[in-house]
Image: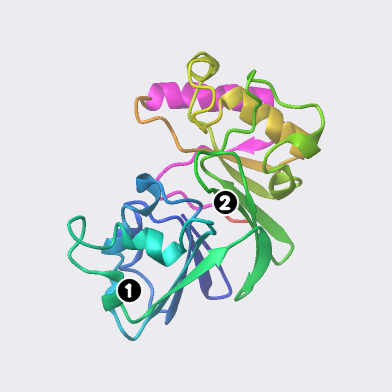
Amino acid sequence: MEITDSGRRLILDAGTGIRKLGLTGDEERFDILLTHLHMDHIQGLPFFAPLLRPDREVHIWGPISTASSLRARLGRYLSPPLFPVRIRELSNVYFHDVPPSVVEIGPFLVRADLIMHPGATLGYRVSSNGASIAYLPDHEPALADGSLPDDPEWISGFDLIDEATVLVHDSQYDDAEYRDRVGWGHSSSSHLASLAEMANVHKLVPFHHDPGHDDGVLDEMAAGLAAATTAEVVPGQEGAVIEV
């Protein structure tokens, strides 16, 4: 996923789609915001063409850890036997360990905060020109008993989501599936609907679809979301463009 404004863009996570994205644009600097380092969010990173262009800068932002730096953690993947090119061979890559904080990147004001998902995981809120996009693709906002707290202060990531123009959010499970997967770090569609209503989100993009769900299941889940929330529901799909 990417966010563009005033000739600059932010790239959100680095799944396999980042390869195609890296073949477009002629900017000198690229900024990649990683929510966490699970394989489906970094798998495309070694195939991002600007990494191999010394005339380009690639800035990689990701969650801080007490165990090791972002560079060291990504280095386990960007090295043999998983990949032939080591990070130390890439002279144009800059790493930023991100604590809960606010940072300016070009025209964007980026707020990062830790959210509920196994391992160090960030959610992001990107603001520019009076609009805001909240991005929480892997997130379990419910409590262990499967319900949302009544008080928003006790809901993971709520401050990132509150009054967002667009919310891109985990919607992996239906209610029956979630009951058997509490604690796995993902959301049910009904929890997402409740969250979007509590936060008064304007446009909702359900994301991180379960790979076992076919188009019919996804359409049914999207229809359920649309019926349960006042937000406009735009299901996440490859190639979709949303104007904010």
Secondary structure type for disc 1: helix
Residue 163 image position (x, y, % from top left): 76, 46
Q: Residue at x 53, y 75 (%)?
A: 7
Q: Residues within 10 Å of mark 2 (few under 14, many from 20)?
A: many
Q: Amino acid at mark 1?
A: Pro
Q: Depth check: 49 or 26 in front?
A: 49
Q: Nearer the viewer, residue 33 or 67?
A: 67
Residue 162 visible, this orientation: yes
- Give the magenta part as a residue range: 215-242
Residue 173 drawn at (x, y percent): 49, 24
| Amino acid type of the residue tagged 2 in the rendering | Leu
Above-or-below relation of 41 to 70: above
| Of callouts 2 and 1, the N-terminal one | 1
Question: Which one is nearer the viewer's eye here, 2 or 185?
Answer: 185
Left or right: residue 127 versus residue 30 is: right
Q: Residue at x 40, y 50 (%)?
A: 41
Q: Indicate whether residue 216 is drawn in magenta.
A: yes
- Judged by depth in the image, the label closer to the viewer, 2 or 1, is 2
Q: Give the vertical position of 124 relative to 233 (above or below).
A: below
> Image quadrant for the C terminus?
bottom right
Rendered image: mark on residue 50: 1
- Side of 2 relative to 141 (left or right): left
Q: Please check the rendered image and state whether residue 184 is part of the magenta-colored stretch, yes or no.
A: no
SS class, disc 2: strand
Q: Is residue 32 left or right of residue 122?
A: left
- Which residue is tagged 2? 122
Residue at far right of view? 151
What crowding class fits label 1: few (fewer than 14 Cα within 10 Å), some (14-19), or many (20 or more)? many
| Residue 115 sits in quarter | top right
